Image (tube, rainbow, N blue to C red):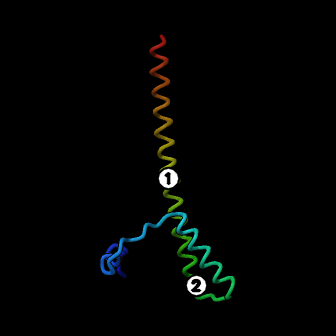
Amino acid sequence: MIGNERMAREIGSKPEVVTVERLEAAIMVVARSIADTGEVTHVPLLERLESELAKMKSARDGVSRARQIVGEKVLERERKRDLLQSL
């Protein structure tokens, strides 16, 4: 299987950026096609898109959690510093 960047070079275009919004739109298109036609051959594609979306959202959640943890530690240090300065 050819990677996105290599394929883009071969056809002379830039690789497309995968975003949550693009995955959600693709899921809607595939789901609508399956619902309208009853064609089950596209179900694996739908499942793959849903899996990729879940991974992307999970990664986002991980980054958010990390930022929250760091932010809480910074606030805790600032509170301690302010308390010590007020003594």
Q: Residue shown at 47%/19% (left/top)? A: 82
- Mark 2 is on which residue type? His
Q: Which residue does the image show at 59% across and 73% down from the upper left?
A: 27
Number of other residues with Cα within 10 Å of mark 2, as a class: few under 14, some 14 to 19, many 20 or more: few
Mark 1 or mark 2, earlier in chain: 2
Q: Nearer the viewer, mark 1 or mark 2?
A: 2
x and y, in percent, of residue 76 in the image: 49, 29
Measure the C-alpha gap from mark 1 to mark 2. 30 Å
| Three-letter amino acid code of the residue under disc 1 | Gly
Residue 85, x across and y down, in percent: 45, 14
- Residue 81 horizontal/vertical position (percent): 44, 21
Regarding mark 1 in the picture, which secondary structure is present there? helix
Residue that numbered label 1 is attached to: 62
Where 80 sits versus 59, above or below?
Answer: above
Q: Quadrant of the image for the N terminus? A: bottom left
Which quadrant holds residue 45?
bottom right
Q: Which residue is mark 2?
A: 42
The image quadrant of residue 51 is bottom right
| Residue placed most toward the observer, 55 or 4 | 4
- The residue carrying pointer 1 sits among few (fewer than 14), some (14 to 19) or many (20 or more) residues within 10 Å by Cα, namely few
Q: Residue at x 49, y 31 (%)?
A: 75
From the viewer's side, name the closer residue of 32 and 70: 32
> Disc 2 on helix, strand or loop?
helix
